[in-house]
Amino acid sequence: MICLGIESTAHTFGIGIVTNKGKVLANAIDAFKTEKGGLIPNELRNHHEDVKDNVLKTALEKAEIKLKDIDLVAFSQGPGMGPALRVGLSTAKDISSETKAPVVGVNHCVAHLEVGRLLTEATDPVLLYASGANTQIIAYESGKYRIFGETLDQGIGNFIDAFARYLGLGFPGGPKIEGIALKGKDYIQLPYVVKGMDVSFSGILTDLKRKYDSKIHDTGNLAFSLQETVFAMLTEVSERAMAHTGKKELLLGGGVACNKRLQEMCSIMCRERKAKLFVPENQFLVDNAVMIAWLGILMKKHATKDHKRIDIKPYERTDDIKVTWK
Ligand code: AMP
Ligand code: MG
């Protein structure tokens, strides 16, 4: 069985092609970027509409298959931005009507976890999912992927991007802040906001903007302190989720997990508690459609869904999904 997955929850339009054995045949994406400013939902829709045919063509060429070879179509139904999600849904319907392949809608956050299990040796990990819009600590317990901790306001990537935008940098800001942080070495005190198992970034953002405006602080030191603070918060709650569940594996997912300093902090924490850290390649950390195709296969094999009712679910939660395939 060959599954074609479609990702369009936010900035990235992607098509991934995977076999039922988990062989990745293609991972094509086109991600929206800006010189200045952030993501506007209608601009994302236009971007996805503009690039979708090309991304599909690239994926089919890479996989060396024709559209008629597709047996299943999976698309990311949520969580995400409505206008962007709708492009994925309509693309799924178009491909399905051409190929007669059934369509399955999948949860984006669960897909990050499952692709990590496919591509690394992680079997039952705690997932630190650190992306643009989402920040969650997820682990399997009693039939569901449960959220053990999460952001109370914005996602960590959106927070970093917002500070980057304040410095006049475009989207995505994360890699740029990582570069600037390498020039800093003096830690500037910032609020450290962990509430129970949850984290919050908006107060830190306000404080950073204020410190930047004061012109007293070096920008490198601010970027360095931002990373040290918020990555320590994420490492702390991940460690507590591991202690609580007794799990011995930490898996990273989401674009922010590409950050070398976050990876280093998690690696030290795992080493100290004799746990294993798994970090998929960057192309599978960021939003991609291989993970969507693979979760589609898992759900189809285990007949999780009524394939007739397909729609977008912009507010779907990780723990809304009953995990029948594990
Ligand atoms: P995703 O939504 O999972 O595709 O991830 C996109 C987010 O990851 C954006 O907010 C980026 O700024 C952020 N990002 C990408 N690379 C890095 C990096 N090296 N360090 C920090 N954030 C990053
Ligand atoms: Mg994501």
Image (cartoon, rainbow, N blue to C red):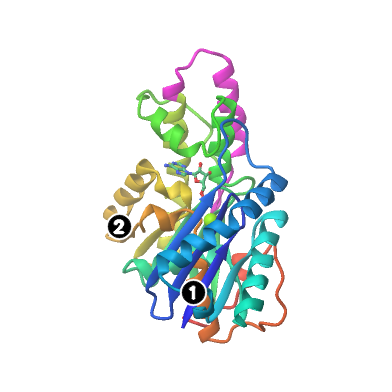
Specify the label residue 51 is tagged with: none
Is residue 290 in sight in this rendering? no
Percent of width and height locating residue 31: 53, 48
Does residue 165 appear to the left or right of 232 in the view shown?
right
> In the rendering, which numbered label is found on residue 66?
1
Q: How many marks?
A: 2
Q: What type is the residue that disc 2 sits on?
A: Arg
Q: Residue at x 35, y 29 (%)?
A: 182
Rendered view: 222 above or below 15: above
Question: In which quadrant of the rendered view does residue 284 lie?
Answer: bottom left
Q: Residues within 10 Å of mark 1 (few under 14, many from 20)?
A: few
Q: Is residue 11 above or below residue 311?
A: above
Q: Is residue 184 magenta?
A: no
Q: Which residues are magenta?
A: 195-221
Q: Report if residue 198 is visible in the image.
A: yes
Q: Secondary structure at mark 1?
A: loop
Q: Could you say where residue 71 lies in the image, as x and y percent from the top left?
A: 53, 82
Asked if residue 203 lies in the magenta stretch, the reply is yes
Mark 2 Cα shell of 10 Å, populated few (<14), some (14-19), many (≥20): few
Looking at the image, which residue is at 72% across and 55% down? 83
Q: CA distance from mark 1 to mark 2?
A: 48 Å
Seen in the image, is 243 located left or right of residue 110?
left
Q: Which of label 1 and label 2 is nearer to you?
A: 1
Q: Amino acid at mark 1?
A: Lys
Q: Are marks 1 and 2 in contact (CB under 8 Å)?
A: no
**Residue at the image point whose x is 65% and y is 57% from the top:** 80
Residue tagged by mark 2? 273
